[in-house]
Amino acid sequence: MITVIYSDSQLSILKLIHLYIQYVLRLTMALSTQPYKGARDYYPEDKRLQKYLFKVMRETVERFGYEEYDAPILEPTELFASKTSDEIVNEQTYTFEDRGGRSVTIRTEMTPTVSRMVAAKRQELPYPLRWYSIPNMWRYERPQRGRLREFWQLNVDLFGIKGIEADFEIIQVSDAIMKAFKAKRDMYTIKINSRKLINTFIKDILGLDEVQSTTLIRLIDKMHKMDFVQFSGQVDSIFNPSQREKNEPEMLFEYLKATNLDDLPESIKDHESAKELDTLLQMLGTAGIQNSEFDPTLMRGFDYYTDIVFEVFDNHPDNNRSMFGGGRYEGLIGMFGVEPVPIVGFGMGDVTLSNFLELHELMPEITVETDIFVVFIGDVYQRALGVASELRQMGLNVAIGGPDQKTEKQIKTAVKKQLKYALFIGEKELTSEQYVIKDLTTSNEETHGLERIVSIVKDYRKG
RNA sequence: GCGAGUUUAGCUCAGUUGGUUAGAGCGUCGGGUUGUGGUUCCGAAGGUCGUGGGUUCAAUCCCCAUAACUCGCCCCA
């Protein structure tokens, strides 16, 4: 055992060294206050907006009889690997091993999960099944406008209806959500296409093989990103010489230029998918959704959708892009060894929706959850707490200043919290049971009993 | 994975053709009012000019690298 005895001056030097080390640590090791790349912090004012968005979504889809479900954010990696392409699983997911050596993946979409849930109770669920969810998802990719790593997505799915009525309902729900957000007809366009129709045309009528079709679909999906000369050049290179001799590329261009079903080439015009599209567009028109139109170039990815697809486009010149969409797809239900179910659905992301609402100035001012802030004056804090409790029992959301805060400070706090009302409680008020309620936005003050105060606040809350 | 732009006070941004103590507005804190804020007046705190290296007598400024952010591309379930 060695005991070291320091002199006073040595101790003060040690203290200085200690302080210096702390200082250096603070400089070099200070934690970043930034949220993780591509993810957002929700401060109360942000969370309020999100609550508004979700509330409108929930109220709208529930009016159509959809029920909310939820599920874990983690799934076994196989669930995604089986369905999605290798590139997505390997490069765009958060995948890791749990402590038991199992590979798990944070969900990047809801389809595998909802398919698993429906398959598990395939026989006992009531059809038509109307389900929705607002899950958060993670994709490992570079953030850019309208795309982050973590986002929330309303998923709405209708299971068990084979006919076009299901597609109609899903598009109608999409439109109802836009309306519920106060969007006007001219702000967005609903573009509709049939994957079955284009597949019939390029495979059965033009006679393209599987590889040609896939390449072509992929190219059509991108055609609005290039000029027509470039596009037609690339289309030509997909067709083989004998197909080119039969003028097939020109037939394709005729097809793609159609702005309504009557413009389609004669060879495909009477196909049942064309008739279905026609019925669908008529149903939408009858339902007052006139801003829906046929767009033969709409593809939405490659393999996923099997029949009707639709996309809601923002008409604003600064944001002329697809906001969200959906269509009919097989899902993964068959993979779980049960009989498949017809599914039509869509997914609506919160980021693109927020962009839309901001750009069209549709984002409302959201009021704070707290109704009223109690400002106590003098040595009455305990008794003011009693009044606050009474108000809470009467249905108000009530906050109170810190026990040591001066009156001025309490008011500043209430104003900074953007509250509408402050309630002043001092000796005078406690004695008379008449309290001063102040409207912080107008500086107007009135003196009332608690009953009257509660009704004033509740009236404001409703408005 | 590729490319462009940005990074100076808590926030929004000036600025220095390389030269002593780097500025503004807003915000924050304290005071002029012991039962009342948002308007006014006075005062204060707050910056290794993103990080590391190089050139130079001297770098916040020039060069290189790197990170973060923003916007595109790729991809998009």
Image: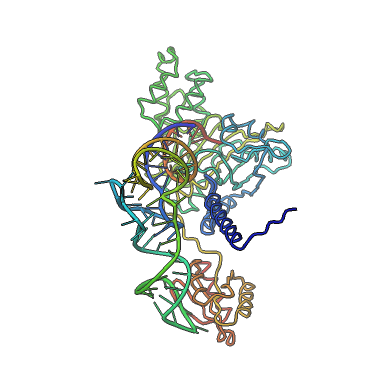
User: Residue at image x 54%, y 41%?
Assistant: A168
Residue A235 percent across, percent down from the top left: 42, 22
In this orientation, does residue A56 appear?
no
Q: Is residue A379 above or below residue A52?
A: below
- Which residue lies most toward the top here? A242
Q: Looking at the image, which is closer to me, A365 or A270?
A: A365
Q: Residue at x 56, y 80 (%)?
A: A425
Q: Is residue A406 above or below residue A145?
A: below
Examine the image and state in which quarter residue A160 appears. Answer: top right
Residue at screen point 51% across, 70% down = A414
- In-image side of A188 versus A46 (left or right): left
> In the rendering, at what x and y percent does residue A89 appear?
60, 33
Q: Which quadrant would residue A383 be assigned to in this image?
A: bottom right
Q: Is residue A249 above or below residue A120?
A: above
x, y (%) of residue A200? Answer: 51, 24
Left or right of A391, for residue A420:
left
